[in-house]
Every structure is written in structure tokens, then in C-alpha cells.
Image (spheres, helix red, strand yellow):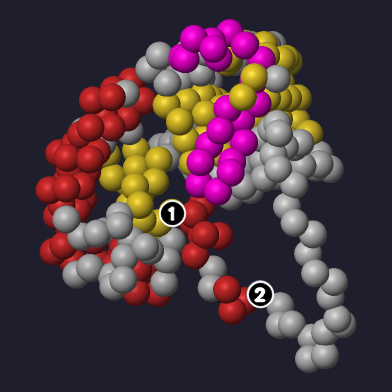
């Protein structure tokens, strides 16, 4: 008689959206990096203590050597954060990540594609009219239109994450403390925001966040974020809109 052994899988492997912060290094100074990150962790410990971060070396004039990168990684750890990889860059960055035993995080790839990949201008372009002067911004600009929208009905509980890939997200309920809502497009929350909201997750700087009751831990658009240990009195509990102007994330009452 043949005996049959049932062998269970050792694990499940799934890919999902996770909230990873990006540390953009502007100079190779491990001590200064540690001090700056320690300041961020001290200012918002619930947000940044033991936070997973990606090291972005693309804004340095030259790629550091292995020893310098190792010192930067140790500076991140000493500040209380956890480096989990390098941001996508050149083939040299890929080789560096391989030597350091770290993954490349492709989520940040779009920011580093060379401008040369853009379509070439026609040889004989038609004469263009002069551009009209820009209109003054008197209120928050309107959100861009998208084809698809994902709806989440009800509250988003603490520890839960809702991600709308390649579309806008509408939440009809409260986003609790410790909860995250993420969208590649705009985010509309018809309820209170006590957790985190991240719009334009793949780099869309035109994305907007609309909230009915603002008490957020963090809001972010295309990687630019604002953390709130204490909500400004004029915004607390109000209906607000968040948008980007340059590299500044602005918030105004609706």
C-alpha cells in the first residue's frame, strides 16, 4: 500500500502596495544625514520611528563608493529608520545595489527616466502664438479628470491600507488613526481623515486630496508630504483641499 504525504506550502508570496518613505540624499555626509533624520523622527515618532525608507542617490553629482553608501545606510539606521533598498537609477546604481545586497525599488523609476526619451520636436514646427500670462491663483486648482475611480464604502480601520492603482479613490467613511489611503490619482474622503492620505503615488503632481473632516497624521502628493503632530486650529475638522505648487504642498479650506 502506497502512503501519500501531503506537503503544505512553506509560505505565500504576494506583491502589494506598501508605504515606503524616500530619503533623497543631497550630499554625502553621514553625520548630517543622521542629525536631519533624527530631527524628523523626534518631531513625528509615530510616523517615522522604524519607518521603512528607500535611499535615493540620484541627486548627487557622482555616485558614492560602497564605503560611503554603507555609512549613509548606517546613518539612517542610527536615526531610527530602516533602509530597505535603493531608489531606481542608472546601471551603476543597479550594480551598487547588487554589491550592497539591497533591492532596487522600481516604484521611483519614473522620476529618473532621461529627458532624451521624450519625443523629438518636428523639424519645421508651426509658428506658435505667444503664451498668455498665467492667471493668479485665487483658490485651490480643480482636480484633474480620470477615467476610472475606485470606491471604498465604510471606514478604513487602523492598520488597514486601501490603494487605488491607476485611478482616483473615493472613501465614504472615516480614515482612522494608523490607516492609509493611497491613490495614483486624486483622493476624495467624504468623512474624517485621521490617518494618512497619499495621492499621486506614481508621481502625478496634479493630483489633489479632498477631505470633509481634516485631522490627518500625514498628507502627501507625488512624494511631497506634510506631517501633523498638531492640526492648525483653522484647519482642524474643516473641509479642505490639498494640492502642489512647485515643491510645496498647500492646504486650504473649501
Q: Quadrant of residue 198?
A: top right
Pick the front one: 69 or 246: 246
Within-10-Å neighbours for mark 2: few <14, some 14–19, many 20+: few
Q: Residue at x 54, y 68 (%)?
A: 113
Measure how far apart labels 1 and 2 are at the Cα level: 23 Å
Q: Secondary structure at mark 2?
A: loop
Relative to 34, is 239 above or below? Answer: above
Q: Mark 1 or mark 2: which is in front?
A: 2
What span is colored magenta in the figure?
231-251
Q: Residue at x 81, y 41 (%)?
A: 145
Q: Residue at x 28, y 24 (%)?
A: 43
Pick the front one: 152 or 249: 249
Relative to 183, is 166 above or below? Answer: below
In which quadrant of the rendered image does the C terminus lie?
top right
The residue carrying mark 2 is 118
Q: Secondary structure at mark 1?
A: strand
Q: Residue at x 13, y 64 (%)?
A: 67
Q: Position of residue 226 (x, y in %)?
A: 45, 31
Q: Position of residue 9 (x, y in %)?
A: 46, 37
In the image: residue 95, left or right of residue 240? left
Amino acid at each position: 500500500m502506497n502512503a501519500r504525504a501531503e506537503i503544505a506550502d512553506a509560505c505565500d508570496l504576494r506583491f502589494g502596495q506598501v508605504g515606503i518613505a524616500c530619503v533623497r540624499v543631497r550630499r554625502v555626509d553621514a553625520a548630517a544625514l543622521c542629525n536631519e533624520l533624527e530631527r524628523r523622527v523626534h518631531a513625528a515618532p509615530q510616523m517615522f520611528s522604524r519607518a521603512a525608507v528607500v535611499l535615493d542617490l540620484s541627486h548627487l553629482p557622482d555616485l558614492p563608493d560602497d564605503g560611503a553608501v554603507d555609512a549613509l545606510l548606517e546613518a539612517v539606521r542610527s536615526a531610527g529608520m530602516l533602509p530597505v533598498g535603493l531608489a531606481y537609477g542608472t546601471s551603476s546604481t543597479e550594480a551598487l545595489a547588487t554589491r550592497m545586497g539591497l533591492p532596487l525599488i522600481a516604484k521611483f523609476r519614473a522620476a529618473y527616466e532621461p529627458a532624451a526619451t521624450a519625443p523629438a520636436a518636428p523639424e519645421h514646427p508651426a509658428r506658435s502664438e505667444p503664451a498668455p500670462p498665467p492667471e493668479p491663483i485665487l483658490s485651490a486648482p480643480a482636480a484633474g479628470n480620470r477615467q476610472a475611480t475606485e470606491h471604498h464604502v465604510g471606514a478604513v480601520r487602523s492598520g488597514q491600507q486601501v490603494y487605488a492603482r491607476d485611478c482616483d479613490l473615493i472613501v465614504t467613511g472615516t480614515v482612522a488613526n494608523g490607516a492609509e489611503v493611497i491613490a495614483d490619482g486624486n483622493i476624495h474622503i467624504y468623512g474624517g481623515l485621521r490617518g494618512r492620505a497619499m495621492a499621486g503615488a506614481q508621481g502625478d503632481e496634479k493630483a489633489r486630496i479632498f477631505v470633509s473632516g481634516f485631522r490627518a497624521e500625514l498628507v502627501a502628493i507625488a512624494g511631497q508630504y506634510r506631517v501633523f503632530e498638531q492640526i492648525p486650529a483653522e484647519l482642524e475638522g474643516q473641509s479642505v483641499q490639498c494640492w502642489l505648487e512647485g515643491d510645496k504642498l498647500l492646504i486650504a479650506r473649501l
